[in-house]
């Protein structure tokens, strides 16, 4: 992790907003030296507890000219190489994405949904462009039954409850009731309208993700799924395609919770499954898993086969292939790199195992999925 040369400056700036007497009850955004942040004040029964700060992020790669200007502001107190390395380590994210994250984080802390327009209008640091988008989103929402989180709170609660409890059998009724009518599907000719729908569905997937975690789904699994489907949303170019991806995401989350409830594995097996998922890119051994569960390797192996139905080694392969499928879809990394990252001995062995579980080769899988995305965008 790079040392932050701005720590003292940020601390001073944040202290302006985080005061105990009347802490702001919404995310606060601020920018310092091209770095963007937001923070949320924490309170319990009106008692100020502290502050959560998220950042920094950059809106785009920073230029050498900007670095020089920043150096001038420090008056030689910071080494230029150190400064460049620090900025190179900062992730890139636009303010729209940062705003979405702030709304989700606020909801996870207080279980209270904030209006995006309200947050923007109370933050001078958010750009006028976001204010225009927020106003447009608000206008587009009038007269419509939006899918999730706007006009029908009871519907939202029902859906999230179904996800949390793995009620796959109930989802069709919810979809039939809520999805935007067919008459509106031809109206998305302007890019800003399409952006509005994507933002709405991204918020929906984030809350569905949280509901699935509450239902017992592993955190890392849930967040990876969320990233996977949000990236798919960004790739599509029509309302029909957006709704299709969103429905698929909701069904996937709900089905995974259902499978967890159905399986009812013992605590050691669940702990093994979570460890395996979180270490797919590392070396996973039976001895490590046995030590984690405080069981003998032979007993754990027997117990895993009895409860899950397949040996631990096969389960690990299966999970790595599932991870490979995601990488093949959402990245352009060479197949050889993916097989190496996921600890397969060589590419030919990876292809053999992949075909065993999926029925096609990795190249065929990537090609078929790409074709599907292209036809969706056309």
Image (cartoon, grey):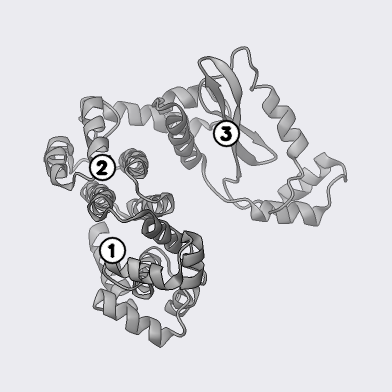
Q: Earlier in the sequence, mark 2 or mark 3?
A: 3
Read off the residue under disc 3: 38
Read off the residue under disc 1: 307
Measured as percent of width and height from the top left, residue 164 is found at: 28, 41
Q: Within the image, what quadrant is residue 297 found in?
A: bottom left
Q: Residues within 10 Å of mark 1 (few under 14, many from 20)?
A: some
Work out how far the residue at label 2 is from the one at label 1, CA to CA, in angstroms. 24 Å
Q: Nearer the viewer, mark 1 or mark 3?
A: 1
Q: Residue furthest right?
A: 76
Residue 229 shows which numbered tag?
Answer: none
Vertical position of residue 38 compared to residue 331: above or below: above
Q: Earlier in the sequence, mark 2 or mark 1?
A: 2
Q: Residues within 10 Å of mark 3 (few under 14, many from 20)?
A: many
* Nearer to me, 248 or 232: 248
Q: Residues within 10 Å of mark 2 (few under 14, many from 20)?
A: many
Read off the residue under disc 2: 163
* Nearer to me, 35 or 26: 26
Q: Are marks 2 and 3 in contact (CB under 8 Å)?
A: no
Vertical position of residue 119 compared to residue 359: above or below: above
Q: Within the image, what quadrant is residue 367 found in?
A: bottom left
Measured as percent of width and height from the top left, residue 365 is found at: 29, 74
């Amino acid at each position: 992790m790079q040392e932050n040369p701005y720590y003292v400056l940020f601390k001073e700036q944040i202290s302006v907003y985080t005061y105990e007497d009347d802490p702001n009850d919404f995310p606060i955004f601020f920018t310092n030296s091209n770095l963007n942040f937001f923070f949320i004040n924490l309170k319990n029964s009106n008692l100020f507890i502290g502050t959560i700060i998220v950042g920094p992020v950059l809106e785009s790669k920073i230029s050498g000219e900007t670095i020089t200007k920043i150096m001038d502001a420090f008056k030689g107190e910071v080494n230029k190489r150190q400064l460049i390395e620090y900025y190179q380590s900062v992730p890139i994210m636009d303010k729209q994405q940062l705003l979405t994250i702030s709304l989700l984080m606020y909801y996870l802390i207080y279980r209270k949904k904030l209006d995006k327009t309200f947050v923007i209008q109370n933050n001078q640091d958010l750009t006028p462009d976001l204010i225009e988008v927020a106003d447009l989103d608000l206008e587009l929402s009038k007269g419509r039954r939006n899918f999730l989180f706007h006009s029908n709170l009871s519907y939202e609660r029902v859906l999230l409850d179904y996800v949390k409890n793995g009620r796959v059998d109930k989802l069709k009724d919810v979809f039939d009731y809520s999805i935007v009518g067919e008459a509106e599907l031809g109206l998305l000719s302007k890019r800003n309208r399409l952006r509005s729908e994507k933002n709405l569905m991204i918020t929906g997937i984030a809350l569905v993700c949280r509901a699935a975690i509450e239902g017992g789904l592993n955190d890392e699994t849930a967040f990876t799924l969320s990233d996977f489907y949000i990236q798919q949303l960004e790739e599509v170019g029509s309302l029909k395609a957006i709704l299709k991806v969103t429905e698929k995401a909701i069904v996937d989350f709900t089905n995974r919770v259902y499978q967890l409830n159905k399986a009812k594995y013992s605590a050691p097996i669940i702990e093994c499954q979570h460890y395996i998922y979180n270490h797919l890119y590392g070396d996973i051994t039976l001895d490590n898993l046995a030590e984690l569960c405080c069981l003998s390797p032979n007993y754990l192996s027997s117990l895993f086969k009895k409860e899950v139905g397949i040996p631990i080694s096969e389960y690990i392969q299966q999970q790595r292939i599932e991870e490979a499928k995601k990488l093949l879809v959402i990245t352009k990394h060479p197949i050889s790199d993916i097989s190496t990252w996921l600890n397969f001995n060589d590419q030919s062995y990876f292809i053999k195992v992949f075909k065993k579980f999926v029925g096609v080769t990795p190249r065929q899988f990537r090609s078929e999925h790409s074709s599907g995305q292209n036809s969706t965008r056309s």
